[in-house]
Amino acid sequence: MKEILFRISRPYEIFSTQKVAAVQLPAVNGDITILPDRAPTMLLLRNGLIRILDNQLKVVESYFVKGGVADVARDRCAVSSEEVFNLAKITIERAKEKKEASLHEEDKNFYDYVISVLEKKQ
């Protein structure tokens, strides 16, 4: 099966690069699944979860992103976001600490979202 080269980065750092079957992005106008051979496109992302999907379109890995942009072309999907972290590697306690340390309302709102997802996951 054909794959997509998926890269996710934040300012000054490539967070992850991997070959994936598909990826679901939290686009501003709704979630969109990127499959191989997709037409080129640029997407604005909202705060949300990027989901890496296997060949059966089941989620194998998830990343929180604080908005950003996605560039899709020639079986590549490059995401750039201000904040990125793996869903499996953050706890509710850590998210609450980050929210308390946040100076801006948009950061607090982002961590509220993270906390709500983590609470539903329990």
Image (tube, rainbow, N blue to C red):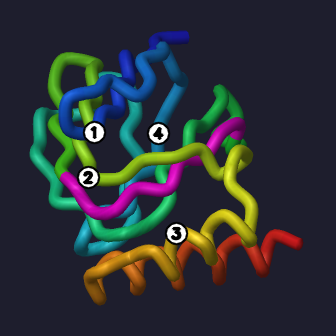
How far apart are the alpha carbons under marks 4 and 2?
Answer: 19 Å
Q: Where is residue 27, by image quadrant?
A: bottom left
Checking the image for residue 108, the label placed there is none
Q: Which label was assigned to residue 23?
A: 4
Q: Secondary structure at mark 3?
A: helix
Residue type (three-letter) at the residue carrying disc 1: Arg
Measure how far apart labels 4 and 3 are at the Cα level: 27 Å
Q: Residue at x 48, y 50 (%)?
A: 50
Which residue carries the number 1 mark?
10
Amino acid type assigned to the residue bearing label 2 in the image: Glu
Q: Is residue 101 above or below residue 69?
A: below
Determine the secondary structure under disc 2: loop
Using residue 82 as the reference point, say whether residue 24 is left or right of it.
right
Across and down, in percent, residue 37 comes to 29, 24
Question: Callout 1: 10 Å neighbours few (<14), some, many (20+)?
Answer: some
Say which of marks 2 and 3 sits in front. Answer: 3
